[in-house]
Amino acid sequence: MMKISVTAQQIPSLLDEASAGVSVLSLDCFDTLLWRNVQAPSDVFAELGLEGGAIDPRVLAERQARKGQALLTGRNEVSIEAIHARLVPGGDPAAIAASVQAEIDAEARHCFGFAPVVALIRAAKARGLTVVVVSDTYFSAAQLRMLIERAAGAEVAAAIDRVFTSSDHGMSKPEGLFAPVIAALGVAPGAVLHLGDNIHADQEAPAALGIATAHFVQFDARTETRLRHEALAAVMLDPATRQTVPALQPHRPLLSLRVGQEPDFVLGHDVIGPLLHGFAQWVRDEAEALARSQERPVRTLFLMRDGYLPMEMFETLGADMPVADISISRLAAGKAGLVDEAAVRAMIERDAGKHRFDVLAGLLLLEPQEARALVGPKGDVADLERAACTSEVAAKIVRRSARNAERLIAHVRRAGVQDGDLLMIVDLGYHGSVQDRIAPVLKGRMNVETAGRYMLLRENRVSGLDKKGWFDKRHHGRETLAALGSSIAVIEQICTQPKGSVVDYHPNGKPIHEKPGEKGAQSATRDRIQAGAIAYGRAATAAGRTAASDDGECRRRMAAAVLARLMYLPSAEEVAVIGDFTHDANMGSSSHMRMLDGSRATRGLRRRGLHYVQSTARMFLPGELQDQGLALNLALFGIVRSGLDVRESDFQAGGTPVPVILANAREDCLVEIDAYPTHDGYCRLTVPARGDLTVAVLLGGLYEAVQIEDVSFQPIDPIGAEPGPSDRPDIDAPHVREGLEPIAGDLFRCTPNAALLIPPLPAAGEGDYKLCVAFRPVVRRDAASEARQAA
């Protein structure tokens, strides 16, 4: 007797494994023949239209109906009518029937035939086998057959000879449903091969009767977890999810069919693929809509470098629409876009104080010695900003920008753009700054109109340009958009070309790239991620019939959840894949930053506690926190998604009083200051810092051994300041460890009088500071004394 497990790829050829005596193919229905376009079966109930959400009432009604049936008969199989009799107040037969029909309609909207099982049915009929469906369900056989026809098509329904349901027979598969199935078919158990996804109902129960079985494993454990976390992310992004809208997941069947287990390929196929394939479809639809509305052709150009993988994904659609690429960085666009003195002033106002002196000089098209001559040997960034706003200097910048614009225009013409064209620029986003800077240039020199279509658009400054995002303010509030874009550098690095940023153009428009600063290993990893994404795109385009609910809005909702899950709940395997990636800012600084530094995150948590997640600016903080457990990233997700105004004091609880001496030249005092738990058993105490105040933290009276993590002066945000990272840096505090004897590294043995002595705060510029001491108690003095007495 065959008793095996199969994956989705093995299902179409399953009959090749069966014995010659098999004459009946038996199939489970849900999650085998019929799949739902949602994460959990109960998601379908969200569309039943009950005020306040229908999932909980519908689940409770079924539970009550089953309990009532068990009291009467000892078995809990019920019909859908019995369930809805408890869901509809008053029990009016017409109202119950309408409620039942609403659920069947919702199922039909979200269900679809799983292609490998449909292929297996065709193979079975070609061999002359009888095909039956055996399902644990509250639907009757007639209702289930009707649902199969609506969801999978008339051909599939006609190929099914018999349908058996637990509600019709009053027993589930584990309770013996296969016995009346065999009796009704009039065959020996060994003549039946059953396929289903539930190992108890679809393998153990029929195998006990001698039926050959194949347990269908839909997903591996990691994929199962990822899909569950994507539904979690969907709920956090949009409160309507699982209230009036299901947690939609149209990518599930392709994830089940994926070939390849390497973590980088899986990241590309299962995560980046669904995200960018839906985006590519939206870009296609937008180009067609723009052409209709403007009544003229649209030239679609993908903006390199980050537009590389979106363009490759667009090609998998097989759309009859020519596209090309253009290589315009923010740096190149900015240098070409200073079309007049107003543009120079606008650039300086927009970026005031953001750049180093040398970077700002380059952006203003000034040689380093020119910039220095304008401000003098002691001049700073602010002085250079003021100098550039003067008419004489601004006029020089505008003349030089015009020469850059000529070269940029030559590059645009190389992409096939002609005077008077309507141009649609496609990019990941997120403010459309390149479009802002080149639109006046293209309009003025070529009479070219520009539209921008972005995966994520967070346009904070009103530009007046034609811009849309697949995710934008039409769909999400500013907090949600901020959450989706918080670690977007990860997506940028995955989507980019293996080239340096464009810094200029040759006179013929050929781009000049800076030398890539990334490692060869990063490029190879990215290639494998991109290969996985493209494999998904090709499979998605070739996929056959899907659920009626699989429309553009469904895919946008799914993609938002996929993106948010990666941004905030990455897996250990995903973090390992991108752990060595670096990122450049494309602004002429030639600096490449590591995207992940887990040790820094650990230090930050030990020194600041949970407040660290809100008070730091990191490129991929959730990735750095991944090995700390799910709780921290869920907290970070909730804080950012909801724009919560939580402060450091909100996280302080369970403090331990520590004696501290405060002294200046005139007086001193002994006070107790609470040290609050942070992370990994560390504590943190804070003391107001002054230029005349010496602080002694008396650790020896409390502890026999401690670890000293940090002693520093940290800025105090002014009252009313927005939560987030401070613009001022921490200042290491020189200190004396009196009575602390080194054991190893930062671990010290304390004498009874041991203390940390911290001199006054040095000159630190503007703003108030506090002294912060982070330490971990290793052995408490009272606990050590009790242990010695007990011994």
Image (cartoon, rainbow, N blue to C red):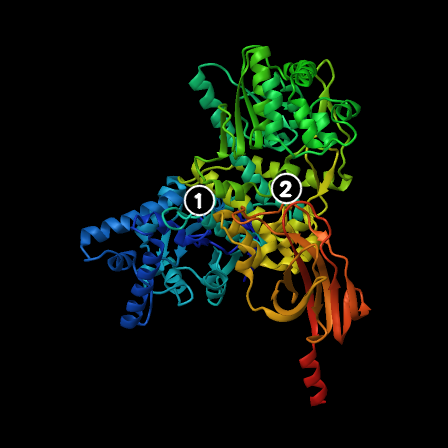
Q: Which residue is drawn at 46% across and 36% down?
A: 473
In the displayed structure, 527 sits above or below 631; it is above
Evaluate whether residue 521 shows in this view: yes
User: Relative to the observer, which residue lies in front, 188 or 477?
Assistant: 477
Residue, disc 1: 113
Which quarter of the picture shows residue 755?
A: bottom right
Q: Does the image show residue 116? A: no
The residue wearing badge 2 is 490
Q: 190 and 584: which one is in front?
A: 584
Quadrant where the image shows the C terminus:
bottom right
Residue 431 x, y percent position in the rendering: 55, 32
**Amino acid type, residue under disc 2 in the picture:** Val
| Element type where label 1 sits in the image | strand
- N-terminal of the pair, mark 1 or mark 2, is 1
Which residue lies at the image location 32% right of the left edge and 52% below the top edge?
52
Disc 2 element: helix
